Amino acid sequence: MDYTFSPVTDFTELEDAVARLYGPAAAPRQLERYRGLLKGLEETFGPCGRAAVFSAPGRTEIGGNHTDHQHGRVLAGSIDLDAIAAVAPNTEGIIRLQSEGYPLIEVALDDLEVHPGEVNTSAAIIRGVAAWFARQGCALEGFNAYVMSNVLGGSGLSSSAAFEVLVGNIINSLFFGDRCPPIQIAQIGQYAENVYFGKPSGLLDQMGCSVGGMVAIDFKDNANPVVEKIDFDFATSGHALCIIDSGADHADLTPEYAAVPGELKEICAHFGRSVLREVPEADFFAALPTLRRKVGDRAVLRAVHIYGDNARVAGQVEALRRGDFDAFLMHVTKSGLSSWRYLQNVVPAGYTHHQEVAVALAMAERLLDGRGACRVHGGGFAGTIQAFVPLDMLDGFKTEMDRVLGGGACHVLTIRPVGGVRLA
């Protein structure tokens, strides 16, 4: 194995890498995280003469709400919250992974078939990623890993995809000669999530975590998505990127999430297609009277949103290319309104007493007062909203959102320039 530095005796290389990744201002705080990470590795698994350190960021969806599962367009950005791992070799043919605050996971490398009892577990992700590499002829060996993450769970920032990308980068770097580029690492994570974890997700989350920076992704050919880096410095925009936790829980909302692709599938079936990207928009609108009778109005409105948000992503990208942030914000606002009105993923069907996401959006709109922009973030129905807040309003905005929704509800993020990475 090619482990590059010792957690005990060689900290200089890691210090330099952390400063490059997080920037000089954040480096001291981040270094304390990594010192705790390396300490956790040794306290959990005993002294280790060699170790390697990895990081994989969370991601924020900036444009294209629910478009990815219809092979549409999205705009995503990796963020400055990440999952980090310290890794040391073992000679037992077992992957042992200890996430801070969770039970130890063990995956034997001679048993990489799907385990039905592991559905919805981190062990399934590890086994699935390892299985993909093993089937490509990768000479896997056992290792011990200690993992810490500050990617907010249940926030729409893709803590699970960050974990998948982290595991993929560990194996790719240590055992596969870094042969898999970031896009393929994302696809490996999706494979593990779909086949082993049991969640039929799209590829947006993994792409946003793996590629890094701000990326426009076209999923027309889902097996070979077109990924384009967008060179725009948000620091020059005069706005802060905020993710606000509405306080609503995703539990028991699986039918709401499943209904979105389910209803769109019914529309596609009318045209003999599998995803909406394959149905020409003109054909859809020409068939509207028949579709309304056949699949109902909510399904029709959800398709209207998908067509519109695909176009809005292109508008966002073009606005950023020419440095027109006001035009970019206009598209963000329109996307948010479309999600609420047409996609209808703000309030779960039948909910009257609990409408937390709607309250969060109402508060953000009131505080912004025509400036900036806000929208539902990610899957919707629960979780978070996104806001672009003018810097001169940020302190007051954050204070009031925290007052109404609870302390720590509003998180100020930045776009991270790189995705999954080995810090050496």
Image: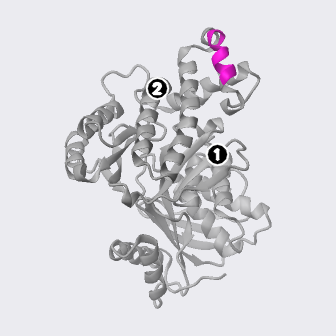
Q: Where is residue 196 in the image (x, y as percent from the top left)?
A: 66, 49
The reply to whether dot 1 and dot 2 touch (C-beta < 8 Å) is no
Instruction: Name the side, left or right, on which 91 lies relative to 42.
Output: right
Q: Main secondary structure of the magenta part?
A: helix
**Residue shown at 74%/27% (left/top)?**
273
Q: Is residue 195 magenta?
A: no
**Residue shown at 61%/67% (left/top)?**
169
Q: Give the range drawn in magenta.
A: 282-291
Task: Please give the label number shown on residue 344.
Answer: 2
Question: SS at mark 1?
Answer: strand
Residue 39 versus residue 372 in the image, above or below: below
Q: Nearer the viewer, mark 1 or mark 2?
A: 1
Q: Which amino acid does label 2 sit on?
A: Gln
As rendered, which of 377 and 257 lies closer to the eye?
377
**Residue shown at 47%/58% (left/top)?**
232
Q: Position of residue 372 (x, y in %)?
A: 33, 43
As rendered, which of 221 and 321 lies closer to the eye?
321
Q: Residue beneath label 1, please? A: 218
Q: Where is residue 265 in the image (x, y as percent from the top left)?
A: 66, 26
Residue furthest to the bottom: 9
Q: Which of marks 1 and 2 is nearer the N terminus?
A: 1
Instruction: Name the side, left or right, on which 419 lies relative to 132.
Output: left
**Residue shown at 64%/45% (left/top)?**
218
Residue 40 versus residue 233 in the image, above or below: below
